[in-house]
Image: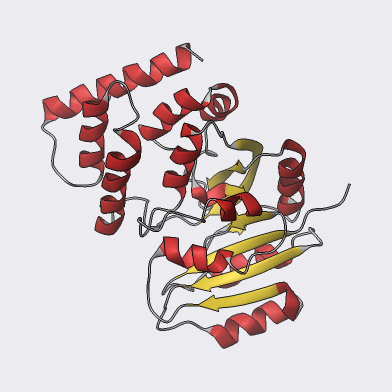
C-alpha cells in the first residue's frame, strides 16, 4: 500500500520557547513523505534564522516552508493561509510546545485515515506533565464511535471534547470546505466540527495517544480570552441554538458562564449542571 503524503502545520505567535522540541518530534518521524509548515501570525520576534537552521539539520529544504504574515490576523486566517501551501493527502496540526508521542505517530495515523476514508480523524492526547489522563476519555471515544451525528452534535455542543489539538483532516476535503470559517478569529476547529456533524459527517477515531501537549493555550485554564469568548458566543448563536430542539436556554446559560459574559447565581448554576448531566445521560442511553 502506498504511503500517503502528509502536511504538518505548526501555528506560532510570539511564543517560541518550546519550538525546538516541537520541530524535533516532527523531524524524527518515520513517515517518509511529510511536509512541514511553520505558520507565523505576525510575531515581532520571529526567530526565522534559528528555526530554519534547526530544520535544515533534520529535513531537506524542499520538505518544509515558513509562512509568515506581516500582521496578526488570528488563528483562523493564519491556518487558512498555511493551508494554501499544504501538500499531499492529509493535514495534521501540531501546536508550538506540543510533540508527537513517538516516531511512528504520523505513519500509523495517516494509514488509519487512508484505510477509513474519514474526512477528519481524532487521536488521543495527554499533558506532558502527566497531570491528566489521556483525552478523549474511554467513554467519549465510545460515543464518537457509536453515536449518530445528531446525538454527537448535541453532546459536543454542550462540552466539546473533539479537540483541534489532535485532529487530522483530509486535505482536499478541508480545502473544499473553504478551510476554516473566517468569521471566527481564534476558534477554528469547533465551527467546522459542528457544521460537519449537522451534515452527517462524523470524525473518525485514531484510538492511540498521539500527542503530548504543553497546555496553557488560548482555550485552556483561567479566564477565557475575551476574543475566544466572543467566538464561542457567535458559535452558539449561529450553529447551536438554531439546531438544538431542547435545552437551548440551558446551553445558552452554560456558554455565557464559560465565556465570562455573566456570573450565574449559585442556584442557577446548580440547575445548569443538573440539566447538563441529565441531557448527556440521555444521549448515552439512546445511542
Q: Is residue 106 left or right of residue 211?
A: right
Q: Is residue 131 left or right of residue 112?
A: left
Camera sees residue 100:
no
Is 164 drawn above or below residue 43 in the view shown?
Answer: above
**Residue farthest to the bottom?**
49
Q: Residue at x 42, y 63 (%)?
A: 75
Q: Residue at x 52, y 39 (%)?
A: 135
Is 9 drawn above or below residue 272 in the view shown?
Answer: below
Camera sees residue 93:
yes
The answer to which image quadrant residue 34 occupies is: bottom right
Judging depth in this view, the residue of 153 and 167 nearest the camera is 153
Q: Position of residue 22 (x, y in %)?
A: 60, 65
Q: Position of residue 251 (x, y in %)?
A: 27, 31
The answer to which image quadrant residue 73 occupies is: bottom left
The answer to which image quadrant residue 278 occupies is: top left
Q: Position of residue 16 (x, y in %)?
A: 49, 74
Q: Residue at x 55, y 59 (%)?
A: 98
Amino acid at each position: 500500500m502506498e504511503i500517503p503524503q502528509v502536511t504538518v502545520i505548526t501555528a506560532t505567535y510570539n511564543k517560541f520557547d518550546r519550538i525546538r522540541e516541537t520541530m524535533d518530534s516532527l523531524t524524527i518521524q518515520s513517515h517518509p513523505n511529510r511536509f512541514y509548515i511553520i505558520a507565523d501570525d505576525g510575531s515581532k520576534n520571529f526567530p526565522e534564522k534559528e528555526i530554519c537552521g534547526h530544520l535544515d539539520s533534520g529535513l531537506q529544504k524542499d520538505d518544509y516552508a515558513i509562512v509568515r504574515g506581516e500582521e496578526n490576523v488570528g488563528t483562523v486566517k493564519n491556518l487558512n493561509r498555511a493551508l494554501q501551501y499544504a501538500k499531499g493527502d492529509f493535514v495534521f496540526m501540531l501546536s508550538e510546545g506540543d510533540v508527537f508521542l513517538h516516531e511512528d505517530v504520523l505513519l500509523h495515523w495517516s494509514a488509519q485515515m487512508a484505510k477509513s476514508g474519514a474526512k477528519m480523524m481524532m487521536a488521543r492526547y495527554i499533558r506532558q506533565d502527566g497531570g491528566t489522563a489521556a483525552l478523549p476519555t474511554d467513554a467519549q471515544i465510545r460515543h464518537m464511535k457509536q453515536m449518530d451525528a445528531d446525538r454527537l452534535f448535541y453532546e459536543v455542543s454542550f462540552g466539546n471534547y473533539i479537540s483541534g489539538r489532535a485532529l487530522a483532516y483530509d486535505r482536499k476535503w478541508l480545502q473544499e470546505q473553504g478551510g476554516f470559517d473566517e468569521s471566527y478569529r481564534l476558534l477554528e476547529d469547533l465551527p467546522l466540527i459542528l457544521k460537519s456533524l449537522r451534515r452527517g459527517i462524523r470524525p473518525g477515531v485514531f484510538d492511540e495517544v498521539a500527542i503530548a501537549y504543553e497546555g496553557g493555550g488560548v482555550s485552556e485554564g483561567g479566564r477565557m480570552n475575551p476574543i475566544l469568548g466572543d467566538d464561542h458566543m457567535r458559535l452558539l448563536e449561529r450553529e447551536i441554538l438554531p439546531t438544538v430542539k431542547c435545552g437551548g436556554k440551558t446551553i445558552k446559560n452554560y456558554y455565557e458562564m464559560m465565556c465570562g459574559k455573566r456570573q450565574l447565581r449559585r442556584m442557577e448554576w446548580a440547575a445548569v449542571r443538573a440539566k447538563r448531566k441529565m441531557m448527556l445521560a440521555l444521549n448515552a442511553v439512546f445511542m
